Amino acid sequence: MANPFMEELIPIVNKLQDAFSQLGMASPIDLPQIAVVGGQSAGKSSVLENFVGKDFLPRGSGIVTRRPLVLQLINGKTEWGEFLHQKGKKYTDFEEIRKEIEAETDRVTGSSKSISAIPINLRVYSPHVLNLTLVDLPGMTKVPVGDQPLDIEAQIRDMIMQFITKDNCLILAVSPANADLATSDALKLAKEVDPQGLRTIGVLTKLDLMDEGTDAKEVLENKVLPLRRGYVGVVNRSQKDIDGKKDIKAALAAERKFFLSHSAYRHMADRLGTAFLQKTLNQTLTNHIRDTLPQLRSKLQGEILSMEKEVEEYKRFRPDDPALKTKAMLTLIQNYGTDFERRIEGGGEAISISELSAGAKINRIFHERFPFELVKLEVNEKELRREISFAIKNLFGVRVGLFTPDMAFEQIVKRQIEKLVVPSLKCVDMVFTELSEVVKTCGLGMSRYPRLRDETERILTTFLREQEQKCKDHIRLVIEIELAYMNTNHPDFVGFDNAAKGAQNKKVHQSITNQVIRKGWLGMPVSLIKGSSKDSWFVLTADSLSWYKDKDEKEQRYSLRLEDMKVRDIEAGRFSMGKKFLFALYYTSGKNVYKDKEQLEIQAQSEEDMEGWKAALLRAGVYPSKEQASSDAEGDMEAMDPQLERQVETIRNLVDSYMSIVSKNIQDGVPKTVMFTMVNKLKSFIQTDLLPTVYSAGGQDSLMEESADASIRREEVLRMYHTCRDALEIISEVSTKTTSTPLPPPVDYDDEASLPPNRTSASQLSAGGPARPTRPGPRPPPPGPSNQPPLSPTPGVPSRPDPAGPRRPPPPPGSRPSVPARPNS
């Protein structure tokens, strides 16, 4: 090779391939390589064995290659092979290599004839090879055999396409010369992914098996189905030669003799054969790597940059240095506290736009879900009146009461206050769940040290449970204090006189101004609004619910008054498959809500969205429905005398007024209690007490012990980092000291005018049309890369055209050529 630095290109790509394969991950960069594509029995395996000079590939009937074989040929002093999955084990017997390929294939695919895309990496050292990397792919087939899946053809095609669709993959399209070239599966696939022919090299096998009187001269001269990089013809051993253990060196000598003695190939014998093909592929792959160096360098720089921070941390890691362990533990716990505070308090650089943070979820619990739970307790009007009626009757006994008994008020109020315990404790449980999730999420930053992470989570979870219990005890105490004394002198309490009038609390929600409470998209089932399946833009105010065609609110579809309206849940999954978040609005009077519908059924986008709308409806005075009271209670209410009815109404107004005061206190006090006893205490504990608690919980050495996965990850990242750095250094050096060889000129796949007489193109063959005679014109480019020197030693001159190729255009006047011109032969 003209430049010694170019020799480093293929080995460094091999090194990158090995590094990515050993990491068990797909290569983040598209590495240059050559994929060998062809049909079954096209001679792919024989071509590769001729390169090596040894029999080492599995043979047999049907699909023999069932996993991609990444074959790295490396020029060395001795002959031996090595598998990547058996690093360090040398194979000097190539028959053992064949057996290991078969065994490794069966380990993944089983004994059946199925295929797998997991590659086998084989490296072969030999003084008879040039540096080259090829990927031998399964041969294309049409009919499944044995227990192969029925879609085996599609599976093989998909596997091949995974390789050849990559821009940096050269395609070695192997086709037998004794078959119609227009039906070649290899050329057909190559043309699909490489229509310009920039990456395709054609190989014709079995030239010695063509019918007598026929030859492939015009194909090899690139006149039939021309390729930009041309064709190279080879002669492999026959099945008889293989069965007879014919030596490959003897077969190569026979191949050379065939081309020199054949009248059709004698004039181009120096551009045919296995030796020329190997040299062509070596130079083509090297030039291809050279051409892709800028892109490869850019991707390597990106990979190195993405690993810099992690590698810097790994470089400082010393498993036997206690000072570094202490510093690492301190840093991890400080980062944990910072992350926890950011998730609760908000802010920071990385703000999620896809989900709510823990602090936002807790805020929603305080201001939407908890008020909703409280309001649900006080809307069962018939049940409440029934209890008041029973309380008054039981207080009077056999007597007839003339005045409204205040004891009935206290009994009913206490029962209502006791009901506040459940939603208050539920609020604590919901916040505890969110905080527990934050504790686990923040612990992901300690995944490298699983014992430290588990110990930290255990300490914080234990502390949080203790604070949860304190919070619940405090809330129970607050409610017990409310039960201990009824302060009827509270300035907001309505009093007996006003309660008797029963006028002040009839329409409390009307005191709210007609302001917009909530806007958003909601859906309605198609059966409800005929011909409409899209969401509508809903606007909720203090006295109405309207929906529009879009958020511009110009085209109103309908509007509902909220007076006498209730909201109820609907069973999920009622209208279609999948989970639905549905609720319904209806009038308690029984009148239709929309047209002939007794209820308006609405679908929210998520559970959070549904809960938010229900909370907004509460603010507008639309309360959740309750089950109707029993028929006996209704009968008792219907039989109530006028005096008892006035007393029930008075007590009802008193209870409503007093519970409004207590509910406000609870609604305001519970979030404050939760924040003080749970959220703030946990945050303070993390900042001040977590580190000493962790220290006292166990030995530092055990806590800061890396997990096995983290240790493997560290070694893999460092190895990958150094491999990329070495590759980048070599690439940078080569790119400044090498010159590129120009690509052969383009050819037209469909240029039927370039076909010789009595020949047909692929399109004509498929259409059955006659061939047209060739028009006179310039001679097409010779087969193979135009820069390939003959096998005999010649001076290394970059980019020198083949003597048989087109002449180089003359230099412009006044310029001096760097190489003296040679007369055209």
Image (cartoon, rainbow, N blue to C red):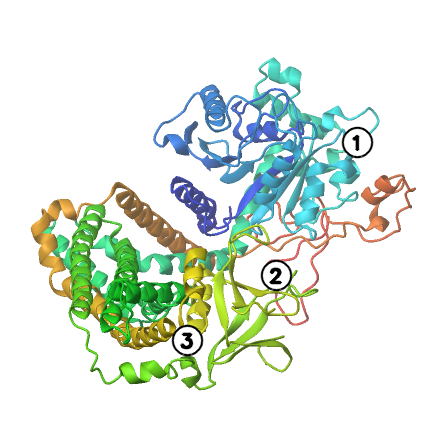
- Give 299 or 174, whichever is nearer the viewer: 299
Using residue 695 as the reference point, say whether residue 170 is left or right of it: right
Task: Determine which residue is flagged by label 2.
Answer: 525
Which residue is at 36% across, 83% downward? Answer: 501
Which SS class for mark 3?
A: helix
Outermost residue toward the front?
A: 399
Q: Is residue 236 above or below residue 280?
A: above
Q: Amino acid at mark 2?
A: Pro
Q: Residues within 10 Å of mark 3 (few under 14, many from 20)?
A: some
Of circles 1 and 2, which is in front?
2
- The quadrant holding residue 383 is bottom left
3D distance between C-alphas at marks 3 and 2: 26 Å
3D distance between C-alphas at marks 1 and 2: 73 Å
- Give 621 or 58, whichever is nearer the viewer: 621
Percent x, y of residue 455: 17, 49
Percent x, y of residue 687: 15, 65
